[in-house]
Image: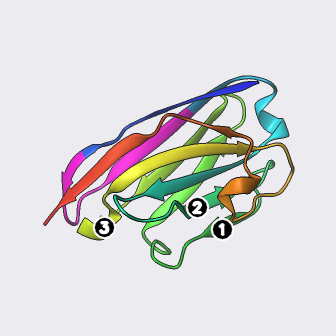
């Protein structure tokens, strides 16, 4: 089992920044590829960014490329999502996810463990 706890969400004005954190506990953090997904009301859950087990490979949704950065601290069992130049369309619940694999994928059903989510609201 892996427990994932997100933090860092909140209300921010358009153009602002937030950094989300996801703290993992339980099984060895370095055994998992990690990802951030988001889900807005009435929409499907979508991948925001993903990172491989080693941290050497990352994937981003086209809508966030150049604005968001995913990273991980394997010694402190934490994955981050730095979000800059936020837009109202970034408003959603953001979820941290873990996949028992060296590589990440873009499909949410491929992930084994999920956090409870953190709300991000961007006002215009």
Classed neighbour count for the residue bearing mark 2: other residues with Cα under 10 Å, few (<14), some (14–19), many (≥20): many
- The residue indicated by pointer 2 is 49
Q: Is residue 24 left or right of residue 45?
A: right
Q: Nearer the viewer, mark 1 or mark 3?
A: 1
Residue at 56 percent across and 52 percent down: it is 36
Residue 90 position by quadrant = bottom left
Instruction: Identify the disc placed on residue 85.
Output: 3
Q: Is residue 67 left or right of residue 87?
A: right
Say which of 89 and 64 sits in front. Answer: 89
The magenta stretch is 11-22
Q: Position of residue 35 (x, y in %)?
A: 63, 52
Residue 4 position by quadrant = top right
Instruction: Identify the disc placed on residue 59.
Output: 1
Instruction: Report the Cα–Cα distance between label 2 and label 1.
Output: 5 Å
Q: Helix or strand or loop: what does disc 2 sit on?
A: strand
N-terminal label among 1 and 3: 1
Residue 32 position by quadrant = top right
**From this viewpoint, which residue is outermost toward the bottom?**
62
């Amino acid at each position: 089992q892996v427990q994932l706890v997100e933090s860092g969400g909140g209300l921010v004005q358009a153009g602002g920044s937030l950094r989300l954190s996801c703290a993992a506990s339980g099984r060895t953090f370095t055994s998992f590829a990690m990802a951030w997904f988001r889900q807005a009301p009435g929409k499907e859950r979508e991948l925001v960014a993903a990172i491989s087990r080693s941290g050497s490979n990352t994937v981003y949704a086209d809508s966030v490329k150049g604005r968001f950065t995913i990273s991980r601290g394997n010694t402190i069992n934490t994955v981050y999502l730095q979000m800059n130049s936020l837009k109202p369309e970034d408003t959603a619940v953001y979820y941290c996810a873990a996949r028992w694999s060296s590589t990440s994928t873009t499909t949410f059903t491929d992930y084994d463990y999920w956090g409870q989510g953190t709300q991000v609201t961007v006002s215009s």
